[in-house]
Image (tube, rainbow, N blue to C red):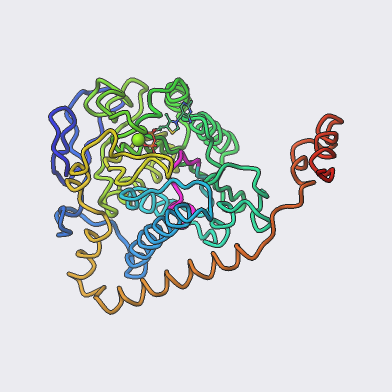
């Protein structure tokens, strides 16, 4: 883990929530695997198929990220925001939910959508914004949305999604159903007023939600030390009467365990939980960013890569080997190739769709503009 004077990541096997009474005890992040993949804590109860699925989805997300960055560099898509290094946090947390739970992503949660079973082809389509895209290019790239899978589109404005997540959880509570809401936020997002509004509301109304902060140590070029003067973001939860804990976000088993416990608590009427997942944004903020301008490249190497770390754990129990790895990589390459080929064959959206989908009857001004767009150029 990355040792830093102001934001250390001590090892430990037990996540210790600071209680709703706000006890200021120092946090010990929940950890199940050692940095090299040895079992050092209590693994969550998962079947062999589920254990393998965690690995497959993390690898799928990594392969997808790598290919989408290449596509952007080749000029085939305009923009991409990878989650490299954060696969365990998103995949593990979404995996711990039930299918009927809602997910309100921040900006780096494509892994949660993959876990939900969203077709990879639709993700590629969203990035191209052509006729294969459900939103017909009306959204910015990486703003996936899947109502049928209870995955709300991310909001471009940082932290907006959190009051919405907490409100949805309140609705579930009023209706008395068993839905839990998982709302994500980044370390940078915790400086926004919406973070306060959401945390306060969740605490006061004891809404059935899990608020998960992906502390990847950077908000574009702003390091977490300049974002907040508190050493552990999880401690902020105490001020809202919410239990807060830290988890090793590069340890997929720890993330599953922490999120599952928090979701179970919420489902049983125990109220919200705040989880700070300690992770690292190993890549650029987006394809428009060059992190070499503001941080040392050695920094990333101090964080265990969550994928080989978990692979070592699977291999130690005989559940994975080199041959299976080769098979998986070939399968992923084929899946991504096929998705790109299919989407690239689609034409651009019908220009008329530019003014559809917002107003029941598009106003005259928009109709005039469309006419101008369609008028043949001289
Ligand atoms: C309200 C608002 N302010 C600024 C931005 C520009 N912006 C986009 S992403 C980002 C950083 C977010 O950092 P963090 O919450 O840590 O998430 P991460 O990118 O690390 O996943 C900023 C400042 C924005 N989208 N919305
Ligand atoms: Mg961040």
Residue 186: x and y in percent read: 38, 35
User: Would residue 307 appear left or right of 143 to someone viewing this image?
Assistant: left
Residue 189: x and y in percent read: 41, 29
User: Would residue 204 appear left or right of 257 to someone viewing this image?
Assistant: right
Residue 274 visible in the snapshot? no
Q: Residue at x 42, y 53 (%)?
A: 69
Residue 184: x and y in percent read: 43, 38
Question: Considering depth in this image, is 326 or 112 the residue closer to the camera?
Answer: 326
Q: Is residue 17 above or below residue 40?
A: above
Q: Residue at x 29, y 30 (%)?
A: 234
Q: Is residue 31 above or below residue 28?
A: below
Q: Residue at x 47, y 30 (%)?
A: 158
Question: Considering depth in this image, is 293 or 46 the residue closer to the camera?
Answer: 293
Residue 337: x and y in percent read: 49, 69
User: Would residue 118 appear left or right of 325 to someone viewing this image?
Assistant: right
Is residue 177 found inside the magenta-colored segment of the image? no
């Amino acid at each position: 883990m990355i040792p830093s004077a102001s934001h250390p990541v001590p090892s430990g096997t037990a996540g210790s929530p600071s209680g709703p009474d706000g006890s200021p005890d120092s946090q010990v992040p929940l950890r199940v695997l050692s940095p090299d993949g040895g079992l050092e804590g209590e693994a969550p109860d998962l079947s062999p198929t589920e254990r393998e699925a965690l690995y497959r989805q993390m690898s799928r997300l990594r392969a997808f990220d790598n290919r989408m960055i290449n596509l952007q560099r080749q000029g085939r898509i305009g923009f991409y925001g990878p989650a490299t290094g954060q696969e365990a946090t998103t995949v593990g947390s979404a995996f711990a939910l039930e299918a009927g739970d809602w997910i309100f992503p921040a900006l780096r949660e494509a892994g949660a959508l993959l876990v939900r079973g969203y077709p990879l082809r639709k993700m590629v389509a969203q990035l191209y914004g052509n006729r294969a895209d459900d939103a017909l290019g009306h959204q910015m790239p990486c703003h996936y949305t899947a109502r049928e899978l209870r995955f709300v589109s991310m909001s471009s404005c940082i932290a907006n999604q959190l009051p919405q997540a907490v409100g949805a959880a309140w609705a579930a509570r009023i209706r008395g159903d068993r839905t839990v809401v998982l709302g994500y936020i980044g370390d940078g997002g915790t400086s926004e007023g919406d973070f306060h509004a959401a945390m306060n509301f969740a605490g006061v109304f004891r809404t059935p939600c899990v608020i998960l902060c992906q502390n990847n140590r950077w908000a574009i070029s702003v390091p977490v030390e300049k974002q907040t003067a508190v050493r552990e973001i999880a401690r902020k939860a105490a001020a809202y009467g919410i239990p807060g804990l830290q988890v090793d976000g590069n340890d997929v088993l720890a993330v599953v365990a922490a999120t599952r416990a928090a979701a179970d608590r919420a489902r049983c009427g125990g109220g919200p939980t705040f989880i700070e997942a300690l992770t690292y944004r190993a890549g650029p903020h987006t394809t428009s960013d060059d992190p070499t301008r503001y941080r040392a490249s050695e920094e990333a190497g101090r964080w265990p890569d969550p994928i080989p770390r978990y692979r070592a754990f699977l291999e130690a129990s005989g559940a994975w080997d080199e041959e299976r790895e080769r098979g998986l990589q070939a399968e992923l390459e084929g899946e991504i190739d096929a998705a790109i080929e299919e989407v690239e064959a689609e034409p651009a959206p019908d220009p008329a769709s530019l003014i559809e989908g917002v107003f029941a009857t598009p106003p005259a001004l928009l109709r005039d503009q469309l006419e101008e767009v369609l008028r043949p150029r001289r």
